[in-house]
Amino acid sequence: MQQDIKNKKQYKHLNAREREIITALRQSKFTLKEIATELGRSESTISREIQRNSSGTYLLTYSGIFAQSLYQNRKKYASCRIRLKNDFIRGYVIKKIKEGISPELISGRLKMKYGESISHEAIYLFIYQERQDLAKYLVRSHRKRKHRGAKCSKQCSRIPDRVPIIARPKSIDDRIEYGHWEADTVVSRESKACLAVMVERSLRSVKIEKMKNKSAKEMKRCVLKMMKDVPADLRKSITYDNGLENVLHQEINARLGTKSYFCNPYHSWEKGTVENTIGLIRRFFPKKTDFACVTPRQVNNVQEWLNNRPRKCLLYYTSNELLKVALTG
């Protein structure tokens, strides 16, 4: 019982992903209570988050990226305090560091011998913030202290108007209607050239186009080319990953009349249809393939093979067979 009470009292701050979800749901006109339910948080937490981290007007200018930046800035300065609490500890640390003893061993000895509880991280911060001349005595010395965890560029998406996959309608998740696509790229270290791949979630219809390089302009060109002959009622949404080749998704939407959704970072399984298709494409173009040497005819042959391949998930029909039914129905 005491353990249950302790667990209930634990609280975790909102993270970057949750702040992006709040932004998307507010754009979709969700109420505070509905947002709280989606995130498994209290309504007061959501309300307080919006009030503290909005850039202007209370209801209109909440941005997940801006809010995360404000939070990180507050957190950074909240931890600014004097490292190592007294002269004795400072002198001991300086002496032992010069003897080549690691901060972790110094921390352990201070606690064992003198009852002083100082973390090794505090010692590292003392060295890099106040006594950088001591860094040369560390086993792995660096001019600057490396930050723990992922870099900001990994945590904060640089894709404008990004709508997270959690805001995607359930009808798309359940594959009950046609016209919802997933997009990705097949790359190789051998060259800048790569492949753009799109797969329709219900019909498993595959489109493949060779890209000169993995740039946003090339991705836009290829997506528009692949979707050019697809009927308008079969172009409803495209789900992407967070690669910078997808930053022009809004321009694609404007041309095709689609909506775009984005997977969570490092959650490739959230667009598993295209990931599985790429696995099949790798049978023909292994990881060391130089795509600069791959011809359009070879790409087209693989595309045709995939679209005429029976699939168990389609009750052993092919994508082309079901596509004909969808077009005539």
Image: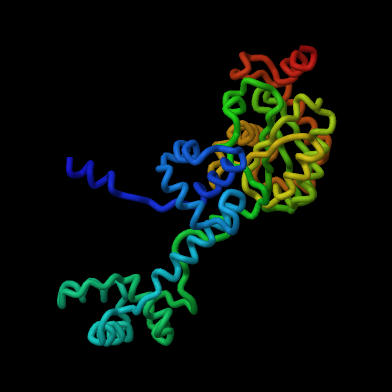
Residue 223 in the image: x percent, y percent? 77, 39
Q: How did the renderer colour the structure?
A: rainbow
| In front of the other: 178 or 48 | 48
Q: Image height check: is 141 above or below 325?
A: below
Q: Relative to residue 92, is residue 188 drawn left or right?
A: right
Q: Which residue is drawn at 71% across and 26% down?
A: 179
For image coordinates 75% across by 32% down, the residue present is 207
Above/below status of 54 relative to 227: below
Q: Which residue is drawn at 49% across and 76% down?
A: 144
Report whether 237 appears left or right of 276: right
Give the quarter of the image for residue 76: bottom left
Q: In which quarter of the image is residue 319?
A: top right
Q: In which quarter of the image is the N terminus?
A: top left
**Residue 154 in view, yes or no:** no
Number of disc labels: 0
Q: In this view, does 64 lie to the left or right of 112?
A: right
Please tell me which residue lies in front, 265 or 108.
Answer: 265
Relative to 272, is 60 above or below? below
Percent coordinates x, y for residue 169 in the rendering: 60, 30
Q: Where is residue 325 in the image (x, y as percent from the top left)?
A: 75, 13
The answer to which of 84 and 72 lies nearer the viewer is: 72
Is 191 on the left-hand or right-hand side of 297? left
Q: Image quadrant for the C terminus?
A: top right
Q: Can residue 161 be seen in this view?
A: yes
Whether 105 is drawn above or below 231: the answer is below
Q: Which residue is drawn at 48% across and 60% down?
A: 71
Measured as percent of width and height from the top left, residue 36 is found at 45, 40
